[in-house]
Amino acid sequence: MGTESESFTQLVERIGTTTGGLSFAPMVLDKKGQKEPVALFMVKAKATAAKAADLLDLVSDVLLGAKLDDQARFKQMALEIKSSLESGADREGWKS
């Protein structure tokens, strides 16, 4: 998926030239003293000190300007994640 100002390809190129890695993951955790779990959205990113401002701009663009309307790209991403999870399960000895 791209952003409001960049296509998916442009975004991937920008991530590659600006960062040493960028990932996002939803999390649900128990919080001590609370009955209800806490939902979080984890952002992991790496960059050199010289590229820190570029990295923050990039994360901001992705979080605030993501275009989520490309159904074909969304399906492709979901299938890639599924394949990765299945191959990881196979390596660990889990068979479906």
Image: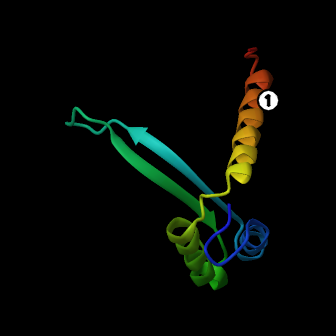
Q: Nearer the viewer, residue 39 or 33?
A: 39
Q: Residue at x 57, y 83 (%)?
A: 53
Residue sitting at the far left: 33
The answer to which image quadrant residue 68 occupies is bottom right
Q: Position of residue 50 (x, y in %)?
A: 65, 85
Residue sitting at the far top: 95
Q: Residue at x 55, y 71 (%)?
A: 65
Q: Residue at x 57, y 59 (%)?
A: 44
Q: Position of residue 64 (x, y in %)?
A: 50, 70
| Residue underneath mark 1 | 87
Is residue 67 shown above or below 33? Answer: below
Q: Residue at x 76, y 42 (%)?
A: 80
Q: Position of residue 91 (x, y in %)?
A: 80, 25
The answer to which image quadrant residue 75 occupies is top right
On the picture, is 65 further left or further right than 91? left
Q: Nearer the viewer, residue 11 or 16?
A: 11
On the picture, is 72 further left or further right than 69? right
